[in-house]
Amino acid sequence: MKNITTLIVGLLCTISTYCQDGEFQVYPNGLIYNQQTMTKLSHIVDSLNLKYKTCNFNTVFYSKSQTIGHLVKVDGGNLKEAKKDMEKQISLDDFLKKYPKATVERNVLVIKRKYKDYRNHDRVEFEHFDVKNDYGFSIESDDTSLYQKDFTNKWLFEYEKKTSYSDESLSAFYFPKNFSSDPIPQKYSQMIGYSDCLIDTKTRKFKDNLKDGWVELPENWTSLSGKEKAKLLDEMRGTRVVGGCSMDSRPREHAIHIALLSAETYNWEVFLKAHLDIMNDRFDRVSDGSYAWGERNTYIKELEELNINVSDLILGISYRIENPVDNHYFGSIGRVGRALSEIKNRNEIEQSMLSIISDNELDTYNRLLFYFLFRNYNHHIKDETVKKENNDKLAIAVKTLPNFINERLAEK
């Protein structure tokens, strides 16, 4: 039975791959929403502009809690004894003298965060932001008190016993200074505040208690009454669509159907979240291979046609902050970078990103995120001359980063 199910899912994925010329229908206006829908959206935006102008942009946002630590790994010798010494909080220098086989990577950026796991249990993670690859070392724990602990001159370690599948291991962070979270400069906080105001964090795209499934959008849906469209939208907002494989287009189709019905029923808050989910490719899938990513477009052009500040919106959802409001929308650095490469005023957005990277009043973590945002952006620029010029500009901006960062970036 399992093999039959796998075969059916595979066939469905193959069918969804070959049954359409493009991802979504593109109308004569060059957009995935026809002119009638775009006109309705423009009316909504115009009617809400007064609200946006009176938004509270004085909120102080704080950087993610971060510090500079040392990454230590012990691969030989008496690991149990080394673990006890870490528990005793001996100094790093004394530890390295006692365990000469230990390796140390000095001055690494470490971010801490709280989150809920798949069982909805509170967890805390301490993660090394590795600028060389995507697989930095991290330590996770269900001891949430660690989040408030003062780690000045302290160890945080992960010990694994030897099993039939793996060797004994000991890896740790040593922190000379405690974690800190600093205010985000006001000009960047205003971008974050603008994104919260425009997206409206009080409303969610989906309702509670979702049911897995699929709600079909009828071919004659545009002729439905307003009440019928609202009911259909409500059904879709109560349904979760999980992709069966990388090529399963249903999650994105579900989102565009929600966006279309939201526009028809003048529900801006839900529309924008649905469209941003399409742009950020934020969907549940059983598996997702990188070979499928290129087929999913970002559709930033649709937002540019509306009377909103797209640059501040997209940059605002790219920062990472310690005190987001409930339902704050965080953009995907990779997808946002690709979207920005399609924006009309590229010179303005390039200068904004380079200024953010070079601003030593901003925390190191966000500056690095914008470094990778700019790299993703530039990767999708088709003009090779422009791409090379941008690389030269980025190299200048990188020199303003802390020495331990730009030295590692220079090695890449």
Image (cartoon, rainbow, N blue to C red):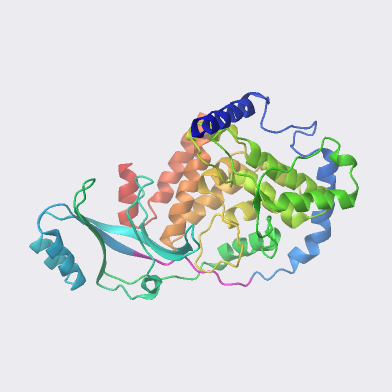
- Residue in view at x 70 percent, y 53 percent: 238
Q: Quadrant of residue 34?
A: top right
Question: Is the C terminus in the top left, top right, bottom left or bottom right quadrant?
Answer: top left
Could you tell me residue 307's position as x and y percent? Answer: 76, 51
Is 407 on the left or on the right of 104, as rendered?
right
- Residue drawn at the location 82% of the way across and 35% of the way down: 219
**Residue 243 left/right relative to 33:** left
| Above or below: residue 403 compared with residue 275 | below
Q: Is residue 68 visible from the viewing direction of this image?
A: yes
* The stretch drawn in magenta includes residue 207: no
Q: Quadrant of residue 200?
A: bottom right
At horizontal 63% and vertical 42% (from top left) the residue drawn is 251
In reply to whether residue 60 is colored magenta, the answer given is yes
Q: Position of residue 108 (x, y in %)?
A: 31, 57
Q: Is residue 372 left or right of residue 178?
A: right
Q: Nearer the viewer, residue 276 or 140?
A: 140
Number of numbered discs on residues: 0
Percent coordinates x, y for residue 290 in the rendering = 48, 35
Q: State left or right for residue 100 relative to residue 283.
A: left
From which residue to which does the magenta span run? 58-67
